Amino acid sequence: MPACSPTPRANRPDQPARPESVTVPSTPASDPRPRVVVGVGGGIAAYKVGGLVRAFTESGATVTVVPTAAALNFVGAATWEALSGQPVAADVFTDIPQVKHVLTGQRADLVVIAPATADLLARAATGQADDLLTSTLLVTRAPVLMAPAMHTEMWSHPATVANVGTLRSRGVTVLDPAVGRLTGADTGPGRLPEVDHIHSLGSLLLCDPGAIPHDLAGRRVVISAGGTREPLDPVRFLGNRSSGRQGYALALVAAARGAQVTLVSANVALEPPPGVTVVEVGDARELESAMTTHAAGADVVVMAAAVADFRPVRAGETKIKKRAGQGPPAVELVENPDILAGLSRPSPDRARVVVGFAAETGDGDGTPLDYGRDKLARKGCDLLVVNRVDEGRAFEVADNAGVILAADGSPPVEVPFGPKTVLAAAVCAVVARRLAGAAPGREPPK
């Protein structure tokens, strides 16, 4: 599982307590693994969920697959049992002595529904309990993550819109579907989000069950990600090692929290998060233009991209040749625009909250945090996330750590080393509190 430890149900203040008369069998001490229930709805996208089950089992969870009867028409019970290593049931009459339709939900640390069909969303929203999966949803007090998949017309139907709104109001995390090819020749919103995105958000909820509230609903958030490439010639460029993972994690979490997210992506080879608008750029000047355009009037701007400080004065129209007896050509550099400083300047269109990132290393003159505080003062942004990039940290890896500094002198928020979604959730939490004008509340998991 992620580097953080799953929060025990007994310590979750956001979850209602069970009646005292209910006895919950405890997880054996010899098996401390988190328990994940993967509910499978009756849609063609069920075939993709095998990858999700494997992702959870390989990351250390005990996975119980609970398909609906319709789902078994797409993928049989034998497949789910082989992937999870656990018996599979779909009805409430299986394993009566153990009261399976209650026990499954009681023991869960996380329930993930994929695909969440229009029918399943409707039954969950109205509190039906006519099979093992919907009974589990009524019993569980664990976080619930639903990944919809259906035709575009079904997703946009007022009944589905109302059902999704009801579920979100109850604290269920319902993702927006991805946009892409559906069954037949149809294309549009309704595609199952990528398995990696579902797994990442599920793992985040195991770390912190309160990490994905719907507190950014109606907010417009613009995020940059990746690394710019400054062309030397048609073949070569000056660049950096940024993979874009942190910016994409921010977009994933912000969208799951309800934001309308525009992701300005510089040279990133990752699948776009569901419900996010992606604008692709190449070099720093393209990034500046896109960010200036899309950030105008936004609620939040997050500059997570690694921008090249300099670019060649001239980019060759032909490939620079290596010639015998000649040394390497001199490359004259010019400074790139300071995009973060530009976005932070006071103006009628300035975002309400501007967040910068500082990838720092320490030296004899100061620590990464010292350099971060200096950058915060120079740039004029509201928040700055300082993260070390030495010793294999930050770039091209799945985990990160950081300290969130505030220009108004609020206490720093330290986020320990862990999945980049955890840092993303911490940033979103600080931003949401500022947008709401609230005092600092729950800190990220330690």
Image (cartoon, helix red, strand yellow):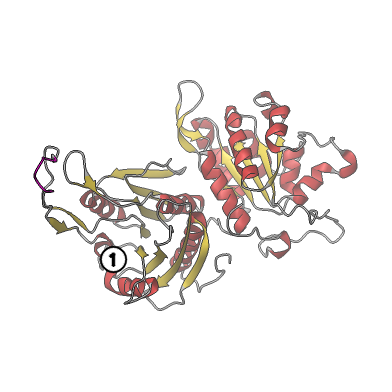
Name the residue: 51% across, 62% down.
Answer: 417
- Image location of residue 84, percent across then percent down: 70, 38
Viewer-side residue, 76 vs 153: 76
Q: Residue at x 80, y 42 (%)?
A: 101
Q: Quadrant of residue 308?
A: bottom left
Q: Which residues are magenta?
A: 322-328
Towards the viewer: 180 or 81: 81
> Is residue 115 in sight in this rendering?
yes
List x then y, in percent, for residue 409.
40, 79
- Residue 117 shown in magenta: no
Give the crowd class for mark 1: few <14, some 14-19, many >=20 residues within 10 Å: many
Q: Look at the image and tell me whether residue 163 can be seen.
A: no
Farthest top residue in view: 184
Horizontally, is 409 left or right of 55 in the view? left
Residue 341 appears at what percent x and percent y?
26, 65
- Give the farthest residue toward the front: 325
Identify the main secondary structure in magenta: loop
Callout 1 amino acid: Ser
- Depth check, front residue: 392 or 149: 392
Q: Residue furthest bottom?
A: 409
Q: Measured along the vertical axis of the image, is residue 331 above or below residue 99?
A: below
